[in-house]
Image (spheres, helix red, strand yellow):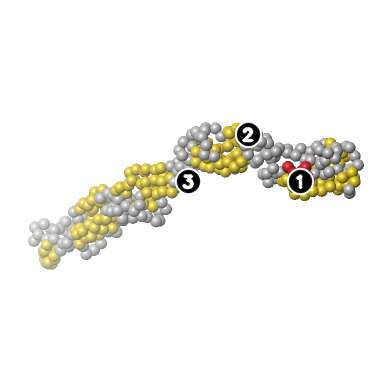
Amino acid sequence: LDNGTSLQTDTLFSALAPGSYEIMIIDIHNCTAYQSITIDSPDPAIITALDVQNTTCGYDNGAVLISVAFDGEVMYSINGGVMQNDNQINNLPAGTYNVDILDEYGCAAASESFTIEPSIIPTIDDLVSSPEECGRGNGQFEIIAGGGIGELSYSMDSINFSSTNEFGNLTEGSYTAYVMDEIGCVIETVVRLEGTPPVEVYMVDITEPDCFQENGIINIGVEGGTGEISYSLNDGPIQNSGIYENMTGGDYSIYVYDVLGCDHSYDFTVEMPLCPIYFPNIFTPNENTNNRYVISTEAAYGVDILKYHIYDRWGELVYSSLNFDIHKADSKGWDGYFRGEKAVMGVYTYLIEAAHPNGKIKYYGGDFLLLR
């Protein structure tokens, strides 16, 4: 190749630069032949563009698309990694990278660098909550959030988002709150709402008063509530005990509340006591002052006698009277006669149906002795 200056028997010439060459061939008889050749040099592959996609939503989802100028096959790698045929490299975290390429002739282009920026994700900076009080479904919380891209929106079901960051009318329990930015990045957090128990009257134990006595007892049982419970009966004075003594029959309303103001009212009735009805055990009609078998009760206690029956010892009805005021029994009671004749002396039986002032119907039965 050098006009005969250096001769070789090998037909291979290597490490030649691009250019034109004349090959000279000499045989053993010193005969020569010549051939001209040209060695071309193809343009090297070069990187023309790097299309970088930054990470989003805090994920390692950055990417780069590598564009090259070369008419042939090219291999790609970043940061000295394994070469690949695909010119797009995905799932890259934020950071700075070097791109290397190698063409089909083994020629490497100069490295190019690029940077994938970290994403700005929404952040929940604070949660402000108020517990549910008194079991009324009045708990609430507010999300204080920042970061992200553009305006933030909020949700409690990850489906329906709005610009409202306050949620109310909640009961005690755990909730998941979601924050989303304009490009759809979502973060979530669990919100635990505490609650205070409602106060409730669960029992009213009544010891009924005696007839025309103020000796009844009311015992109020309360469950739930926070702290000390206060009681007020019929809008009366406040006390810290649920026991009321010296009570009479009637309608009552108890109002209870705790230190947080949780309250409950309950209406109840203490039955009017049944005053006794008195039945004489001896009847002595004398045609003068004791002419009727009179039953009686307290003077101020009204009882309606619905049925008043007198029977002899064989069970035969000897007298009957209906629907009269007990205090008029001196005119409605049995006069000691049967079928117009004086009844014989002996034992007789009464059966009385009486309606008391509280509406209760009660039956009375017994016997008495008729003497003359």
Looking at the image, which residue is at 41% across and 46% down?
A: 140
The residue pinned by badge 2 equals: 214
Point out residue 89 in the picture as x, y percentages from the top left corner.
29, 55
Residue 363 against residue 219 in the figure, above or below: below
Q: Decide: few, some or many residues near mark 1? Use Cα within 10 Å; few <14, some 14-19, many ≥20.
A: some
Q: Amino acid at mark 3?
A: Arg
Q: Quadrant of the N terminus?
A: bottom left
Q: Decide: few, some or many residues near mark 2? Use Cα within 10 Å; few <14, some 14-19, many ≥20.
A: some
The residue pinned by badge 3 equals: 136
Looking at the image, which residue is at 77% across and 40% down?
A: 295
Point out residue 202 in the picture as x, y percentages from the top left corner.
58, 40
Residue 299 against residue 75 in the figure, above or below: above
Q: Nearer the viewer, residue 249 or 129?
A: 249
Give how far apart the Cα atoms at labels 3 and 2 are.
Answer: 39 Å
Give how far apart the Cα atoms at labels 3 and 1 are.
Answer: 50 Å
Residue 75 in sight from this viewpoint: no
The residue pinned by badge 1 equals: 353
Of the numbered discs 3 and 2, the one sitting upstream in the chain is: 3
Of the numbered discs 2 and 1, the one sitting upstream in the chain is: 2
Q: Amino acid at mark 1?
A: Glu
